[in-house]
Image (cartoon, grey):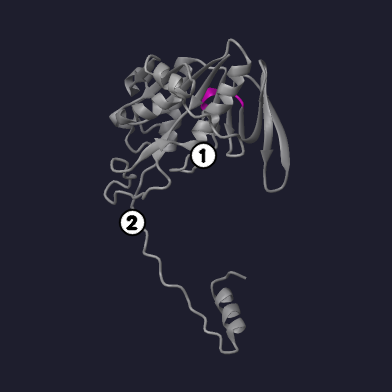
């Protein structure tokens, strides 16, 4: 079985994150970029299955800037056998539609039985990419799983919603996404780090995948404007002179909080 895990490099959530007000894009050059934690958890799901099932090949796929090689290499150090790194200047500021199209093309070229991804990245937080991929690839999409069971023929798991907890399953090939309820990822050890230096990373461009980033016949979003988040205003101070409860109730009602 071949399992492909999607990894994404994102700005560290503990660092200061800003937007370029001219381009509307996140400022990544000066940020401390790391592998998204949810992607590492997705890789742990695949590697745990591979540890218990001989003949399983785990690879990673990332669409990122040229400087993200270290993040891709971390996936190899954790235990993935190989990686595909999609790099192209035409992907700068790619929206979900273009991102899904590119990743789907890469997956079709590479081949897969199961694709494992996080439910949403910590930078975009759209949470739509896994289902978009399943649609483009024409395979079942089993998303937002808090428990995952993989067999040679199918994948199943538990999905929690506001109203119920569901047991869902699909025949392979399929795309699944997992939540932070899954275990933490393993830490790359020295042996894994050294082995990663010899593992292959295949770099592909849009031309290699047959995707035209400027083809507007496909769905593409257009940003019309961007502005800086306004500074946080000072809060309302309530001085209790016997009528604090009334002031608080009035404040809540005025702001439609009750």
Residue at the farthest left position? 22
Residue 40: percent from the left, percent from the top?
50, 31
The residue carrying pointer 1 sits among few (fewer than 14), some (14 to 19) or many (20 or more) residues within 10 Å by Cα, namely many
Residue 220 visible somewhere in the drawing: no
Indicate the quadrant containing the C terminus: top left, top right, bottom left or bottom right: bottom right
Q: Is residue 258 above or below residue 197?
A: below
Q: Nearer the viewer, residue 216 or 198?
A: 198
Q: Is residue 137 magenta?
A: yes
Location of residue 102 by image quarter: top left
Residue 79: percent from the left, percent from the top?
49, 20
The majority secondary structure of the magenta stretch comes to loop
Residue at the disc numbered 1: 120
Q: Is residue 219 left or right of residue 143?
A: left
Residue at the disc numbered 2: 227
Location of residue 28 by image quarter: top left
Magenta residues (range) = 136-140
Indicate the quadrant containing the N terminus: top left, top right, bottom left or bottom right: top right
Residue 180: percent from the left, percent from the top?
58, 39
Residue visible at 43% across and 46% down in the picture: 13
Closer to the eye: label 1 or 2: 1
Give me the C-alpha separation between circle 1 and circle 2. 24 Å
Q: Is residue 10 above or below residue 42?
A: below
Q: Earlier in the sequence, mark 1 or mark 2?
A: 1
Total marks in image: 2
Dot 2: element: loop
Q: Nearer the viewer, residue 210 or 248?
A: 248
């Amino acid at each position: 079985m071949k399992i492909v895990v999607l990894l994404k490099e994102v700005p560290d959530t503990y660092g200061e994150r800003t937007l370029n007000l001219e381009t509307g894009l996140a400022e990544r050059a000066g940020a401390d970029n790391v592998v998204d934690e949810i992607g590492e958890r997705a890789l742990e799901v695949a590697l745990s299955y591979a540890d218990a099932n001989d003949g399983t090949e785990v690879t990673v796929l990332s669409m990122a800037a040229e400087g993200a090689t270290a993040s891709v290499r971390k996936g190899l150090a954790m235990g993935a056998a190989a990686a595909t790194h999609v790099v192209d200047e035409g992907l700068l500021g790619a929206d979900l539609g273009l991102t899904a199209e590119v990743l789907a093309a890469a997956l079709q070229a590479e081949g897969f039985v199961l694709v494992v991804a996080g439910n949403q990245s910590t930078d975009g937080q759209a949470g739509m990419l896994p289902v978009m991929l399943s649609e483009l690839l024409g395979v079942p999409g089993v998303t937002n799983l808090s428990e995952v069971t993989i067999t040679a023929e199918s994948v199943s798991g538990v999905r929690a919603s506001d109203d119920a907890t569901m047991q869902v399953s699909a025949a392979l090939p399929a795309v699944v996404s997992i939540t932070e309820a899954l275990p933490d990822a393993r830490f790359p050890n020295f042996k894994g780090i050294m082995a990663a230096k010899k593992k292959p990373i295949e770099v592909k461009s849009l031309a290699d995948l047959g995707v035209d980033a400027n083809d507007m016949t496909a769905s593409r979003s257009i940003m019309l404007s961007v502005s800086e988040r306004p500074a946080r205003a000072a809060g309302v101070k309530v001085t209790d002179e016997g009528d604090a409860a009334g002031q608080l109730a009035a404040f809540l009602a005025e702001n439609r909080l009750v």
